[in-house]
Image: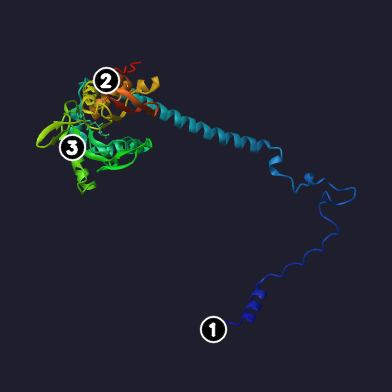
Amino acid sequence: MSAPRAGRAALKKAKMPARAPAPAPKPGPRFPVGNSTGPKTLPRRANPLLTNIANMPPTPESTTTMSSRVMTILGVSALSISTYIGYLYASYRHEVKQSKSLTVPHDVSDRYNHTAGTFDADVAMSEQLMGMGSKRAALVERAHGNVLEVSCGTGRNLRYYELGERRGFDTQGRVGVLGCRSLTLVDLSPEMVEITRGKFEKRFPEQKARVEFRVQDAAEVSRPGFSVDGKKHEGYYDSVVQTMGLCSLPDPVKTLKHLGTVVDPEKGEILLLEHGRSYYDWVNNILDNLAPAHADRHGCWWNRDIGQIVRESGLEVVEEKRWHFGTTWKYVLRPARVGVEVQKS
Ligand SMILES: C[S@@+](CC[C@H](N)C(=O)[O-])C[C@H]1O[C@@H](n2cnc3c(N)ncnc32)[C@H](O)[C@@H]1O
């Protein structure tokens, strides 16, 4: 058991040195303040204990220490930034030199047979940073009825389709038929089509619409067939979707013109989300300088003028929008109606 409390306190007291008694306070305040009376009173602001240290005049030593430390930090930062910019510029010049020395064929679409397996991982980060998910969603939600998607790649749009038809309000607030009655997914690369098929089977285990996968050139897709009383008829697609495809097609104008013949001439729409030239010359210079190397590696000509391709296709522009310095393009197009002049400027 421990010693009783009183005993321990007595022990502690005995070990502590005796404190000298405090001197008796002098009468009156030690430093007279503003509200005291009498002739020696200082104004409150002049009281040395209350004076703000920031208002004190700097000593020569403190000024020298501060400014030399700030100068050192600024100097090191400037040197690091300029070294990094110099490194970037040197790498860019090197890439440009290499890019311009390459002989790249105009048709680079076969590259996707080799890059299909890593395609999703390669584009995931940049698509996320650019907010492409919501742009894809807004485009694909507009597709309805018999839907054709060309250059479908690894099926990055699959998650935005609604399979099966229903009545509801469309993206413009109009009542109509929404969702897909049928979905046809087409790509030139068999590897890409296989990846899309695998994703589709996982995402839609139940069959809610007719779905077809085809390895085919987008410029050769025929109109959809249906049969009535045992007789075969040709119909039209209600919506044609293509995202990030014009950059890879060997003849994008010809393909767009063809897609205009398989979509319903009255109500059909061609929905595009593409990437290409910018509003700005300096961005276009970078795209142009690095285009051969990029096309050779990734199978995509990223410096194409998407607006020019659309104008040359002769399709009617219903909607046009651009983002990311103008390099991301959205189009809603429809076949030019007879008697309606399509603006070519
Ligand atoms: C940049 S990827 C885009 C894939 C996908 N649409 C997306 O948004 O992620 C271009 C795709 O176009 C396909 N492609 C290239 N030429 C084609 C053609 N003539 N017909 C159909 N698909 C083609 C390529 O195989 C590739 O899958």
Spatial distance from mark 1 to mark 3, Cα to Cα?
84 Å
Say which residue appears at 19% left-offset and 33% top-offset: 186
Mark 2 closeness class: few <14, some 14–19, many ≥20 residues within 10 Å: many
Q: Secondary structure at mark 3?
A: helix
Q: Is residue 234 left or right of residue 312?
A: left
Mark 3 closeness class: few <14, some 14–19, many ≥20 residues within 10 Å: many
Q: Which residue is mark 1?
A: 1
Point out the image quarter for the N terminus.
Answer: bottom right
Kind of residue at badge 2:
Ser
Q: Which residue is mark 2?
A: 313
Q: Place residue 55 in its image quadrant.
A: top right
Please state which of the two labelled residues, at mark 1 or mark 2, is closer to the viewer: 2
Please state which of the two labelled residues, at mark 1 or mark 3, is closer to the viewer: 3
Kind of residue at badge 3:
Val
Q: Mark 3 or mark 2, which is nearer the start of the sequence?
A: 3
Residue 44, percent from left and from top: 80, 47
